[in-house]
Amino acid sequence: MKSAFRLDQFLAAGSAAVNRALDRFLPAATAKPATIHKAMRYSLFAGGKRMRPALCLAAAAACGGSEAHALPLACAVECIHTYSLVHDDLPAMDDDDFRRGKPTNHKVFGEGIAVLAGDALLTQAFEIAAQCKGWPRYSHRDIFLELSRASGSLQLIAGQVADLEGEGQMISAAQLKYIHERKTSALLCCSVRLGGMSANCPPAQLRALTDFGYHVGLAFQVIDDILDVTQTSEQLGKTAGKDVAVQKATYPAIVGLEKSRQIAAQLTGKAFAALKIFKGKAVALEALAEFLLKREK
Ligand code: GRG
């Protein structure tokens, strides 16, 4: 029987809660120096899909936790994610004019402020995470380690470095997987793990969430690569066809569109399998994995 779980309602309520919390956590747009706070808020509230916070809240729910306890961590990962997008769009990186359906941060505020807005969002994430409750199994130290490892030079930054260095190069499927694991999967996996930690989940559940987050994270980037060649800029809210234009290695470029779709479905299947341990209590995570596989933007 199909579950009665309403993902649309879960996503709407989760996004609204995350937006309210982010608004509370961030300095006001008028706080001096106003330019930087306006720039931070511009990208943060530009209309992102809030998938990382949703994964964090869904993982908390699977482990019997509460939205209130997971919220600071959900907001922290969204700040890190938004920082990475602001920097990724800079002329020195991907050089993009549109993001989240709006002109990129540097197009509005200039390159200097965009660099600083990214830096400030990254730092803000740790200040927000410091406001979490802390749990018997997971101290504030564990939470900070989790966030810094996922966003550091062995994961998120490593993926971006390999991505930059791979432009215009022939790279293997194994090298592409290395990039996707770090550039995208690490922060998605971290979001899921933090949700479990906010529920003080036992080690076996954290292992299952790690397995789920890793595979969903890889599937997410394969789908992102597919959408880059199948959707329009209007649909995506960012420049479509960019990967081909800069000769970026992607799954569609290496194995073709059909095989890429099969790989995304296989990865999602593995993510589903990891949730067995929750015995039907991970409905929100299951629904999210399916939604992410079928997404069109
Ligand atoms: C330190 C200068 C400097 C740069 C760092 C780390 C980094 C730049 C960039 C991260 C690489 C990156 C942008 C990975 C892509 C991940 C991805 C698929 C992003 C899009 O996520 P969505 O679709 O976006 O969830 P929204 O806008 O909906 O939140």
Image (cartoon, rainbow, N blue to C red):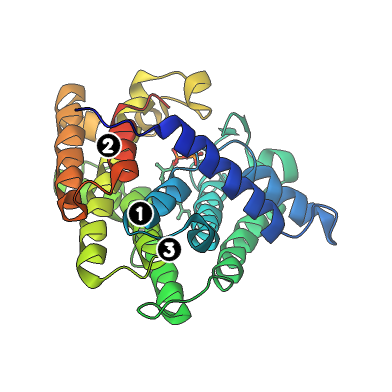
Going by the numbered disc 3, the residue's amino acid type is Ser
Label 3 Cα neighbours within 10 Å, binned few <14 / some 14-19 / many ≥20: many
Q: Does any portion of residue 117 appear in the rendered image?
A: yes
State the residue at coordinates (47%, 37%). Answer: 11
Disc nearer the start of the sequence (2/3): 3
The C terminus: image quadrant: top left
From the image, state whether disc 1 or disc 2 is nearer to you: 1
Whole-number angstrom distance, CA of label 2 to CA of label 3: 20 Å
Mark 1 vs 2: CB contact within 8 A: no
Going by the numbered disc 2, the residue's amino acid type is Val
Where does label 1 land, which residue?
59
* Ligand 1 within 8 angstroms of badge 3 C-beta: yes
Seen in the image, is 39 located left or right of residue 71?
A: right
Whole-number angstrom distance, CA of label 1 to CA of label 3: 20 Å
Question: Looking at the picture, does residue 167 appear above or below residue 187?
Answer: above
- Identify which residue, 80 or 67, lies in the foreground: 67
Disc nearer the start of the sequence (1/3): 1
State the residue at coordinates (52%, 73%). Answer: 133
Residue 222: assigned label: 2
